[in-house]
Amino acid sequence: MLPLWQKGVFVGVTVLAIGAPGAASAQKYRFPIQLPASGTQPYITAYRDHNTGGGIQDWNCGSTTYNGHKGTDIGIGSFPVMDAGSRWAVAAAPGKVVATNDGCFDRCTTADCGCGSGFGNYVKVEHADGKSTYYAHLMKGSLAVKNGDTVSCGQHLGKVGSSGNSSGPHLHFEVRYASNASDDPYSGNCGGPTSFWVTQGPYKGLPGDGCEKPPDVDDSKLVSNTPAQNVVQPGQKFDVTLVFENTGNTSWSSGASYGLKHTGGETFGFASPQAVAATTAPKASATFQLSLTAPTSVGVYAGTFRVAKGNAGFGESASLDVTVEAAGAGGMAGAAGAPWGSGGDITVGGSAGVGAGAASGGKSGGQQTQTIGSGSEGGCGCRTASRRDGQSALGWLLLAAALSYRRRRRCAA
């Protein structure tokens, strides 16, 4: 078995008392060495010492530790394994690299080489819950990360060596709080009440090498809202297309009760919720086709919609703005002056309230056109008639009637 590390490092680190703040919401860790497909498997050589007096005691009330040891030592099979390529130390959880040290001699056998304050070549990773993990005694020149790097769980940090206060190739894995107080990731009768491992494993066995599953996060981003503004008639049906990107880490499916929900304002007859049409993975987008109905009263309306799980909406909202106008509202609105005044265009009809007449009595001295019909833009192109300037409306009509009468008389003759 690999000789134990004989000297403590970072003198002054204290044991965290049971029940210290933060323990209940501890970050969970995977085994911090990548397991090889074949060859010598890693093994525990020393746990943390829980005896604050002159004796030794590990978390299971055993003696697999040594006096004052603050972490967990994991052997890899001595120098032949190291010389054959060693083993990768990996991040036990996601985090940020906040300290590194490299360049220390990595074949120390005396447990007293001192470089790197006893840790030799090492990497320190800070995690989201404020705690940090140390990976010490790494091989010189093997570090695969640098300060400031963001690392994922299981990412390579460096290869196991024998730098610093070490007597043979092994990894010293240690958990510390922001106060620099260290803690044991194991729980047991003689240790703390909370295990920091995803799977702790049996005494003298290895913790599991599976990463902690991150908490579910539902989130969405509005990609498009087509059209965002609608001008319709009372009670008219209209269609809207909403596209949302899945920016969380969950997959949306109808079986898991994901869909679109009305969250405020006018409903426009929307049946809430509308289930997603297909499973939408993170970074993919879901499209919702809405067939809506305008209110029956003229006015301006707005409604909001969000992706939801069950009744809980999340992420960005889509806002629909709808203007309801009365049919034929254009009509005679073009003739604000005298309807048969000095020029101007008059329109009778129109299905969306769009008048074709001039806003204030039309053009001065221009040509006036009367359109009778109900086209979509103020008339359907039916028969039109024009008059010359200076003629009154009554005179023009009498002249037209007289000409018609003379034609009939001639035909009869």
Image (cartoon, helix red, strand yellow):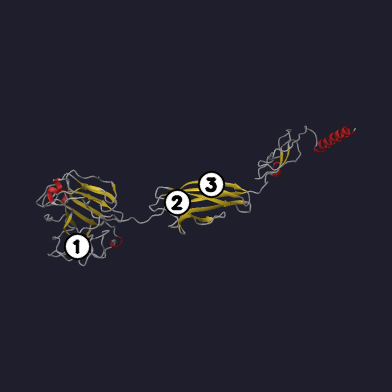
Residue type, numbered disc 2: Ala
Q: Which residue is the site of mark 2? A: 278
Label 3 vs label 1: CA separation?
62 Å
Q: CA distance from mark 2 to mark 3?
A: 24 Å
**Number of residues whose C-alpha sits closer than 10 Å to that of mark 1, classed few (under 14), some (14–19) or many (20 or more):** some
- Is the C-beta separation of discs 3 and 1 under 8 Å? no
| Separation of residues labelled 2 and 1 (CA atoms) | 46 Å
Residue 264 vertical placement versus 283 (above, below): below
Dot 3, how many residues are within 10 Å of its Cα: few (below 14), some (14-19), or many (20+)? Answer: some
Name the residue tied to disc 1. Answer: 203
Q: Nearer the viewer, residue 303 or 261?
A: 261
Q: Who comes first in sequence, dot 2 or dot 3?
A: 3
Q: Which residue is mark 3?
A: 228
SS category of the residue bearing label 1? loop
Q: Amino acid at mark 3?
A: Ala
Single out the mark in the foreground, 2 or 3: 2
Q: Secondary structure at mark 3?
A: loop
Q: Between 117 and 271, which is closer to the camera in this rendering?
A: 271
Outermost residue to the left: 110
Q: Verify CB contact (< 8 Å) between mark 2 and mark 1.
A: no
State whether residue 344 is above or below residue 135.
above
Total count of labels: 3
The residue sitting at 60% across, 46% down in the picture is 231
- Which quarter of the image is occupied by the C terminus? top right
* In front: label 2 or label 1: 2
Q: Amino acid at mark 1?
A: Tyr
Residue 276 located left or right of residue 295: left
Position in image of residue 111 (x %, y %): 11, 52
Q: Quick one: label 2 or label 1, which is nearer the N terminus?
A: 1
Quarter of the rendering occupied by the N terminus: bottom left
Position of residue 77 measured from the top left corner of the image (x, y, whole percent): 14, 52
